[in-house]
């Protein structure tokens, strides 16, 4: 376990780091490409491969954050490689917290590769995934939660996820964590001072007062924890599985949502024999959607495997979209599907509403409530205004009818009609959620000790456990292996 620190100690760790280089833009033909060089030898290395338009070396004595026009030249034969702009960023004011040179060149793959090769031949080594951001963390330029937000910004799939990631990058989460840790540390320090100097610090009645203060901190922790499930859905998307019998319109629904003919649609039952996974956006909501084989009793070996996979995916889903053919009677296959759905959030689509309806909303409610199909079941109310976990809609994938209602139902079901403001703190990282839960449990132990009449030295043990748990969110008291694992998931050049 290492305390990385976030200021002076981090800067000390940065001293003597070797020089790294990488292409930080995509390795594909584009208008502009950027090669970044960072480390103690970055400026000297950059000066070795860059010449101003007049042929002089200017980066070594150049001003920080000033851009220079010139050429990258091959250090071996002096041949010009590309016409570029170069900027020097010195020391602690750079992204990494160390000397950095960025070369903006034309965005051809060959050009970027040639410039990178020049940097490597002059003594730099190829940066590992996430190494620039890792150095920013080690050098105290950002805490660990803000470093993780860098990749969340890059990987954001919708405006809401981007907003929350930018908020975390600006330090909203780390600021709140710092505030809560400060409250915990104050109480710990008071207890330790009172135990060391009882003449000047009075602990009479302290436990009761501490319990009230902890209620406030625990309340704030639980508020953050409660955002985690929706935070994951916003960041990663809602795991959605389309279930139904063969030929009810599942694949047609998927094609309708995607706006393209992605799934094969025929009149032959059992056309879809395996799962088909796609990601799509419904407004601000992202669905990771799986179209499955039609569920029915079958002797076909391949189709049977598809049905088994469909059931497995359904058990792991956040949302089930159960598609029925409203023009056909419900049967035993429908009852099997409902038994698989259980208490999962479900949107039932009475599809093919352009045909004469046979299945009613009352029949669906009866099916889910376990009634004998007589319409008397009242386990779930119908429509989007009903139970948060169950909605019935009439749709026609063929006519593209009911899609707006489907989007509204998803939003209502998961986000109560509105997705939170991006100015709020929303936990989108499961590592952070686990640390918050651990801190909350430790503070509950303190309250338990107070209720049991334990002495104050017992309080400080669990208070410090809570303090350390929160510290792991921002990068204090974390294992080397965890830091390496986090940054290994970053893209090259970042």
Image: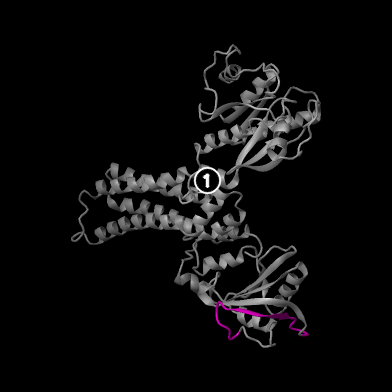
Kindly identify the residue that appears in the image at 66 percent across and 80 percent down: 69
- Rate crowding at label 1 as few (under 14), some (14 to 19) or many (20 or more) other CA atoms within 10 Å: many
Decide: is 480 above or below 213. Answer: below
Kindly identify the residue that appears in the image at 41 percent across and 47 percent down: 221
Q: Secondary structure at mark 1?
A: helix
Measured as percent of width and height from the top left, residue 296 is found at 73, 23
Measured as percent of width and height from the top left, residue 191 is found at 28, 56
Residue 256 seen = yes
Q: Is residue 68 magenta?
A: yes
Kindly identify the residue that appears in the image at 55 percent across and 69 percent down: 95
The residue that mark 1 highlights is 231
Q: Is residue 459 left or right of residue 76?
A: left
Q: Is residue 41 magenta?
A: no
Residue 41 seen = no
Measured as percent of width and height from the top left, residue 30 is found at 72, 64
Measured as percent of width and height from the top left, residue 476 is found at 47, 61
Q: Kindly indicate the quadrant of the structure image that contains residue 67.
A: bottom right
Kindly identify the residue that appears in the image at 66 percent across and 30 percent down: 401
Specify start and end residues of the magenta stretch as a single range. 60-77
User: What type of secondary structure mainly makes up the magenta span?
Assistant: loop
Q: Kindly indicate the quadrant of the structure image that contains residue 277.
A: top right
């Amino acid at each position: 376990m290492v305390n990385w620190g976030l200021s002076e100690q981090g800067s000390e760790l940065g001293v003597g780091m070797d020089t790294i280089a990488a292409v930080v833009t995509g390795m594909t033909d584009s208008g502009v490409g950027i090669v970044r060089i960072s480390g103690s030898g970055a400026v000297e290395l950059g000066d070795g491969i860059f010449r101003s338009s007049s042929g002089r070396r200017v980066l070594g004595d150049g001003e920080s954050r000033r851009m220079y026009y010139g050429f990258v030249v091959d250090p071996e034969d002096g041949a010009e490689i590309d016409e570029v702009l170069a900027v020097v960023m010195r020391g602690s004011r750079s992204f990494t917290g160390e000397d950095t040179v960025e070369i903006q060149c034309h965005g051809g793959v060959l050009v970027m590769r040639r410039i990178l090769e020049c940097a490597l031949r002059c003594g730099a080594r190829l940066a590992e995934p996430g190494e620039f951001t890792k150095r920013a963390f080690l050098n105290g330029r950002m805490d660990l939660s803000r470093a993780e937000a860098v990749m969340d910004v890059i990987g954001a799939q919708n405006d809401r996820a981007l907003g929350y990631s930018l908020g975390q990058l600006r330090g909203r989460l780390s600021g709140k964590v710092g505030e809560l840790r400060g409250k915990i540390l104050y109480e710990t320090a008071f207890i330790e001072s009172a135990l060391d100097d009882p003449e000047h610090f009075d602990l009479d009645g302290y436990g009761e007062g501490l319990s009230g203060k902890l209620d406030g901190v625990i309340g704030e922790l639980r508020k953050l924890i409660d955002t985690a499930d929706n935070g994951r859905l916003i960041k990663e998307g809602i795991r959605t599985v389309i279930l139904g019998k063969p030929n009810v319109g599942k694949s047609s629904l998927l094609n309708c949502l995607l706006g393209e003919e992605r799934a094969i649609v025929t009149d032959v039952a059992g056309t879809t024999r395996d799962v088909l996974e796609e990601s799509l956006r419904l407004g601000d909501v992202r669905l990771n959607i799986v179209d499955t084989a039609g569920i029915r009793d079958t002797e076909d070996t391949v189709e049977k495997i598809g049905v088994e996979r469909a059931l497995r995916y359904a058990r792991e889903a956040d949302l089930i979209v159960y598609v029925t053919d409203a023009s056909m009677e419900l049967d035993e296959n429908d009852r099997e599907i409902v038994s698989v759905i259980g208490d999962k959030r479900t949107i039932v689509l009475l599809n093919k509403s352009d045909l004469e309806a046979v299945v009613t909303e009352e029949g669906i409610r009866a099916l889910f409530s376990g009634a004998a199909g007589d319409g008397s079941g009242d386990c779930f109310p119908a429509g989007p205004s009903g139970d948060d976990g169950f909605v019935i809609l009439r749709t026609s994938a063929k006519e593209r009818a009911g899609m707006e209602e489907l989007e509204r139902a998803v939003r209502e079901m998961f986000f109560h009609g509105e997705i939170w403001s991006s100015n709020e703190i929303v936990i989108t990282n499961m590592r952070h959620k686990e640390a918050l839960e651990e801190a909350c449990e430790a503070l509950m132990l303190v309250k338990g000790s107070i209720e049991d009449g334990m002495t104050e030295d017992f309080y400080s043990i669990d208070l410090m456990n809570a303090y350390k748990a929160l510290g792991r969110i921002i990068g204090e008291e974390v294992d080397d292996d965890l830091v390496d694992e986090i940054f290994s998931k970053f893209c090259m050049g970042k």
